[in-house]
Amino acid sequence: MDRNTLSLALCGVTALTFCGPATADFIKDSKASLELRNFYFNRDFRQDGAAQSKAEEWAQGFLLRYESGFTEGTVGVGMDALGLLGVKLDSSPDRTGTGLLKSDRERPNRAQDEYGELGLTAKLRVSQSTLKAGTLLPKLPVALYNDSRLLPQTFRGAWANSAEVENLSLDLGRFDRINLRNSSDNEEMAVFNGGNRNIVLGRTKTSDQFDFAGATYKWTPNLSSAYHYGGLDGIYKQHYLTLNHLLPIADGQSLKSDIRWAHSTDDGGSNVDNDAFGAMFTYALGGHAFGLGYQRMSGDTGFANINGTDAYLVNLVQINDFGNEDERSWQARYDYNFAALGIPGLTFMTRYLSGDNVDLRGASGEGKEWERNTDIAYVVQSGPLKNLGVKWRNATTRSNFGSDIDENRLILSYTLALW
């Protein structure tokens, strides 16, 4: 979709919203924003014999979000819209593959000058229950949308959420298509099989049905637990348990616990067999936060998740997720919020992760890898540039079975509330 078509479509959606039989609540509770993302990505491949020396591109993204309120009555009706546009600023055939831009259909080694899409979502509300159908951005353990590049990855499907019982949230739904972060096409879904996941597929390579259900209960304001199920029809099934707790210790001190366990099996068309355990503990003291994490994979394959999405793992970081077959990994992390020094909006993060015991399937020895990340970010707090954000992300990873990478990302973002 080119820019003119996208602009006309968004104008048409807005016009229909305000000229149709909308009630006061539909309009009064609506909101819209425009987010601008300027994204520079540089990834150097450091291992000998790499097919490509580096991936380096620069792009500008536009994200127009609109959320309506609901009409009055027993059944409230509403509509959301998401307009996405990515524009190439710099790329070349020998530097593609950053995930920022869409590949040209006729020349796969070249990036398109621009790409975009318009996603619409119809929604119904009855009491404390909501049903959405259309373009969706789920944040569920079994389906976590990816927003790590220029434009977010989206799903197409239907999703019902109910909060009728106090402190209990229920989810139920189905996706039939996925739109990857550097694509404008709705495609069937597949299981991610990078690194050393060692997942073997039968005749079924993709699926047009991902069913999910879940329940989250808040026992106290600081303690919650959840169970979620996700199944990619004909490929894999997954059961996911999570536990989150925040323990206040003293003024300005707390201990946060994040514990996760997932059990994944095949659904007739693969060899998926994985148990994933992860735990992250973070001690906060004033502007400081110290984190320690541990993650372990067991079974005949690595972790299973939909290709193009984020794996909901405690050791998912900038480049790797340490979800390979039999992998054991740990993480040490440090964060600092400079608001404690009177500089609100400035934050710093650094972490180191190490993984070993990866099953290399026939190769001698065990697979080992490590990764180091550093993030520095600042968001302007006031004045004419309020909400302007600048973030630098740096990563280094080394492996005896995968790529050796040095990576830098520079992201400028600005969100403007339209109403």
Image: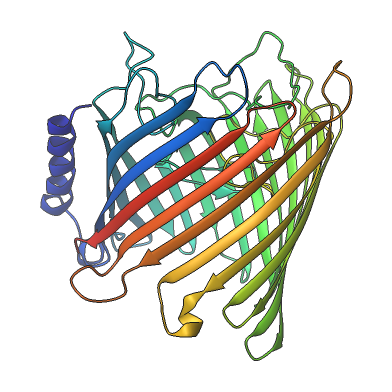
Q: Is residue 78 above or below residue 184?
A: below
Residue 82's image quarter?
top left
Query: What residue appears at the point 66 percent right and 24 percent down from the top-left corner?
Result: 193
Residue 83 or residue 85, whichever sits in front: 85
Q: Is residue 258 visible?
A: no
In the visual, does 338 lie left or right of 411?
Answer: right
Residue 16, percent from left and from top = 15, 45
Q: Is residue 227 visible?
A: yes
Q: Is residue 282 above or below residue 403?
A: below
Query: What residue appears at the point 68 percent right and 47 percent down from the top-left corner?
Result: 313
Residue 406 or residue 289, whichever sits in front: 406
Q: Is residue 381 above or below residue 24?
A: below
Q: Is residue 28 above or below residue 153?
A: below
Residue 217, percent from left and from top = 68, 65
Q: State the scheme by which the image is colored.
A: rainbow
Query: What residue appears at the point 87 percent right and 32 percent down from the top-left corner?
Result: 299
Query: What residue appears at the point 30 percent right and 61 percent down from the top-left corner?
Result: 69
For the C terminus, the image quarter is bottom left
In the visual, does 343 lie left or right of 230?
Answer: left
In the visual, does 161 lie left or right of 244?
Answer: left
Residue 297 or residue 122, whichever sits in front: 297
Residue at the bottom extreme of this rendering = 251
Residue 13, percent from left and from top = 18, 43
Residue at the front extreme of this rendering = 48
In the visual, does 152 lie left or right of 207?
Answer: left
